[in-house]
Image (cartoon, helix red, strand yellow):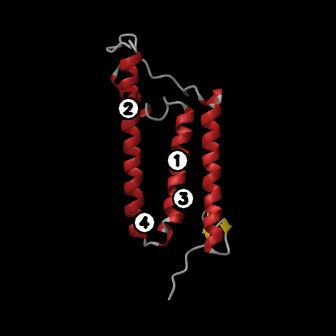
Amino acid sequence: MAHEHKLEIFRGRWKFKSNTQKIWGVLMFLTFITVVEVVLGIYKPDIFMHTWMDPIEGGGFFATLGNVILSPIVYMKPLNLIFILLTIVKAYYITWDFMHMRDETGSMRKMVVWTGVFLICYLIFIMLQEGGYVFDVYNGEDALIKKDF
């Protein structure tokens, strides 16, 4: 007795007749997202290269707390946020369709997917925080390390 896989993507909005067609459909969707990422990476439109808002000034507790909470998202360039979101979408569809996660039980899906989501969010937070620190060390006005090379 063979187990039939679900032949739709985008929550049933796009249906296929066979598994082969579904694989090609998901591959084309992932290829489109990759092409968008490559084009944005090559041309880097000016509209996406400036931050949405400046850090909160004042130095008080709430200004510091606001900067810590908002810094990974609001103070980064929109282009970086677009890359992060498109990468998460690609990872979702690779896991959901190619690895047949949609055909698993609900608890198994939640266990695998949410663990990955939390891990990815944590890693992105760490990279952005540490990257900002390293940038400030090398490029700040009172930089501790001078570039002599």
Disc on the earlier residue, 1 or 4 = 1
In the rendered image, is residue 98 in sight?
A: yes
Q: Secondary structure at mark 2?
A: helix
**Which residue does the image show at 65% across and 39% down from the upper left?**
39
**Mark 4 and mark 3: span between their CA atoms?**
13 Å
Residue that label 2 marks: 129
Kind of residue indicated by mark 4? Arg
Coordinates of residue 123 in the picture (x, y in percent):
38, 42
Count residues near mark 2 (Cα–Cα under 10 Å), then give few for <14, some for 14-19, many for 20+: some
Q: Secondary structure at mark 1?
A: helix
Q: Are marks 2 and 4 in contact (CB under 8 Å)?
A: no
Kind of residue indicated by mark 3? Tyr
Which of the two marks, 2 or 1, is nearer to us in this view?
1
Kind of residue indicated by mark 1? Thr
**Which residue does the image show at 39% across and 29% down from the upper left?**
131
**Which residue does the image show at 50% across and 68% down from the upper left?**
102
Residue that label 3 marks: 93
Count residues near mark 3 (Cα–Cα under 10 Å), then give few for <14, some for 14-19, many for 20+: some
In this picture, residue 83 sits left or right of residue 46: left
Q: Quadrant of residue 28?
A: bottom right
Residue that label 4 marks: 109
**Mark 1 and mark 4: span between their CA atoms?**
19 Å
In the picture, the quarter occupied by the C terminus is top left
In the rendered image, is residue 58 in sight?
A: no
Coordinates of residue 148 in the picture (x, y in percent):
38, 12
**Mark 2 and mark 1: span between their CA atoms?**
19 Å
**Mark 3 and mark 2: span between their CA atoms?**
28 Å
**Mark 2 and mark 4: span between their CA atoms?**
30 Å
Disc sitting over residue 87 in the figure: 1
